[in-house]
Image (cartoon, rainbow, N blue to C red):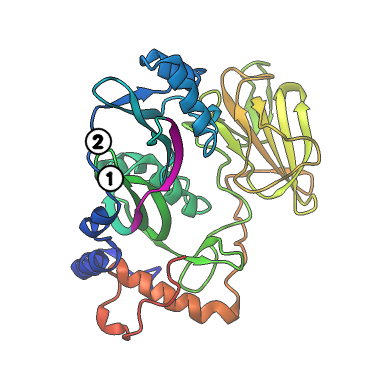
Amino acid sequence: MFKSMPLKLLFVFFPIFYVISSLNFAAPAKELRSVNSPEPLQNARSLKIRRGATLERLLRQAGVPREQSQQIALSLREVFNPRRLRAGDRLLLLQDASGAVQELRYQPASELLVGVRRDGSGGFVAFRDSLASHVETTFVSGTVRTTLYDAVLQIGESPELIVAFSDIFQWDIDFFIDPRRGDRFYILFEKKYVYDPQTQDWRFSGYGDILAAAYEKRDTTLLAYSFPDAKGRLRYYDIRGNSFQKTFLKSPLNYRRITSYFSTRRRHPILKRVRAHTGVDFAAPTGTPIVAAADGKIIHIGWNGGYGKCIKISHKNGTFVTLYGHLSRYAKGLKKGSTVHQGQVIGYVGATGLATGPHLHYTMYYNGRPINPLKIRPVAGKPIPKDRLPEFQQRARWLAFQMGLLPAEQFADDFPPEGLAR
């Protein structure tokens, strides 16, 4: 029902969803601020962490005397290793009118603050504080004019959301060649916020889970609902409980264009003679990550003639084998016999072997015979177990309501379902 429903109905019920999301998910900023906000910062300096610099060196360059710098670094070690300071991050240094350090702060994670502050004896004591945070459920939609990437950026969201959204439908849509002008997308997702003591305001700290998503093309609509599996990991299913995850990815990398298709007669650009091209060439910049198209075991990793640096992976006990050629380098830790999972980075685009430029040569074999990977119809993953199907359908109806696809009158007073948010 929902998979084929025109999503234009969404806007009929969107005002209802907006009110409910505001009431249920937005944390009361003023109340949290009165409990968690520190006093306004005075004489604060922001120090950028440069690559290779130690904490003591950064403090000395900021004019802090050697003895104080050593004391601060030594005290901080009680709660955080100064060697783990990340280049590009910033330290917050608080000093009094005489220049003496009163406090040093560093935020190694979005919800964590560590540092040292001067105690009554003139020394320094370390602290480690968890910052106040909250999660808001957000709904966005948009229309593709050029690319999905541009469309999501135009509505004010970040590339991280684009990646998470495209991962859901990557088995059914190749977002580099399939989208058409006028396609629409819909995303119900979580945004995380953390209280920033420096600005005394809430700051966006990253995306949480995508709860539901849809992509509307001219002839069909794909609508995916999230549901945790037995291990608590979110998976995505249609309203009938069928998995969106398939046995093979539609493409093993993000590419700019296909430069050569599967063919039994193709003139080789270097050898200058006609020979079979038993694969697909994806043009992409050197260093573009390449992922395993499916779960499997590496049966070859190393130089392979004209393919240059090459990886071959066996799937389903050898029924299928995938080959990835012309790599610039391999992912760390891989060797012959290594088990890899679908979507795991295995190497990076290059131009080794007989290649005129950086690209990936991708071949798929079925029972030892090369087949066209662009024409394969992958088998869907495991559906939701029958005993959990009523629980899933209750959750799916609630998510559909939040996306504006169902009216409030269809719900009992006990909604939302218990345990909807993980």
Quarter of the image where one finds residue 304: top right
Q: Amino acid at mark 2?
A: Leu
Q: Which residue is mark 2?
A: 41
For label 2, the SS is: loop
Residue at the image point whose x is 38% and y is 69% from the top = 4
Q: Residue at x 50, y 20 (%)?
A: 54
Calculate the distance from the C-alpha at mark 1 to the C-alpha at mark 2.
8 Å
The residue lying at 28 percent from left, 68 percent from top is 24
Let me know if residue 124 is in the magenta part. yes
Q: In the image, 249: left or right of 390?
A: right
Secondary structure, mark 1, is loop
**Residue type for callout 1:** Pro
Disc 1 vs disc 2: Cβ atoms closer than 8 Å?
A: yes
Q: Is residue 217 visible?
A: no
> Quick one: 120 or 236, which is closer to the camera?
120
Front in this rendered view, residue 297 or 6: 297
Magenta region, residue range:
123-135
The residue pinned by badge 1 equals 38
Callout 2 crowding tier (Cα within 10 Å): few <14, some 14–19, many ≥20: few
In the shown orientation, is residue 90 left or right of residue 355?
left
Residue 382 spot, x, y in % from top left = 62, 66
Can you say whether 42 is above or below 166 in the image?
Answer: above
